[in-house]
Amino acid sequence: MAQEPASTTRAEQYLEERTLRDRLEENWVGYLFILPVFIMFTLLFYYPILRGIRITFTRYSLGGENVFVGLENYMWVLTNDLFFYSVGWTLVFVFATTLLQLVIGLFVALLLHELATRHRQWVAAIVMSPYFAAPVASGVLWFWFLHPDFGFITRIFVEFQMAPIYFLTEGIWPYVSLIVAQTWHDYAYAALIYGAALQSIPTAQYEAAAIEGADRLRRFRDITLPHLLTPTIIILAIRTAYNISEFAQPFQLTGGGPGTQTMLLSILTYQVAFVNLNFSRAYVIGLAMMLISMTAATVYVLSIRTEDELYI
């Protein structure tokens, strides 16, 4: 029997490289349907970005004349100590909150997956509830808990005649408070994604492993974890972008204080734009935030591509 050419085999398996023209001819109806969305996305996303980049080369003021200043705004950012401090603290904040959200979300998803169906819905509603609260409302709640004068936790210390801990104003506690509050609000997102991934794992794989004598820990390592790799990368990409741009809850809790101790890039952007009324410099800071998000997203996308290549 004659062996089929490699090109024919690749074509049958949909591995043959196709040109852009081939894809347009095959899927022109689909592209026609998404064209309005692409146009609106361009007008509402790409055009503002390009216009903002143009503004960074000017001294922009509302209702006034926009004077071209070249790279002055970029030089101001690159020589500003507070900007570099905010970059460092933002990276720590994003890394810590994203990691904690992954770990806690996975734990919650595994817990819900093991519960009986009749209990799962009620427990899920309780443990997922923080995610469905508005960030401002969540910030107000944590502010009421942690305020050094009238906070609920402060009152507990006073009632037991203990020296209160000033979570929002003293030592390392403002950093810890922001990370814990942000983790508490958003860990449910990871739990939702992990929960869906766990439901998609065939039970036959666990049964076969149990017959072979694999204990619970080995089944988790050899079966569960490989299925959670792609969801983990997706969660990392989305939560990293959201945590970098997070503003409402940290601003409600500390406002970047005490002083500038917890100044995230998002809060610094707000202060430069709406307190100092320097929108050009604020947009340069916003571009730095976008660059960090895009760098992280690129790393995650490359990680997914590397994983896909393992199975081809």
Image (cartoon, helix red, strand yellow):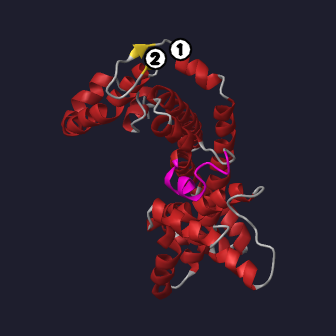
Q: Find disc 2 in the rendering and name its residue.
A: 57
Magenta-colored stretch includes residue 128: no
Could you say which quadrant of the image residue 12 lies in? Answer: top left
Q: Which amino acid does label 1 sit on?
A: Leu
The answer to whether residue 32 is above or below residue 226 is: above
How crowded pointer 1 is (Cα within 10 Å; few <14, some 14-19, many 20+) is rated as few
The answer to whether residue 110 is above or below residue 26 is: below
Distance, label 1 to label 2, CA atoms, is: 6 Å
Closer to the chain start, of discs 1 and 2, is 2
Residue 308: percent from the left, percent from the top? Answer: 54, 42
Q: Find disc 1 in the rendering and name its residue.
A: 71
Q: Which of 145 and 106 is in front in this view?
A: 145
- Asked whether disc 1 touches disc 2, contact meaning CB atoms under 8 Å apart, the reply is yes
The answer to whether residue 286 is above or below residue 245 is: above
Q: Which amino acid does label 2 sit on?
A: Phe
The span shown in magenta is 246-259
Q: What element carries label 2?
A: loop
Could you say which quadrant of the image residue 210 lies in? Answer: bottom right
The answer to whether residue 137 is above or below residue 4 is: below
Whether residue 207 sits left or right of residue 6 in the image: it is: right
Taking the spot 56% from the left edge, 20% from the top edge, the residue there is 74
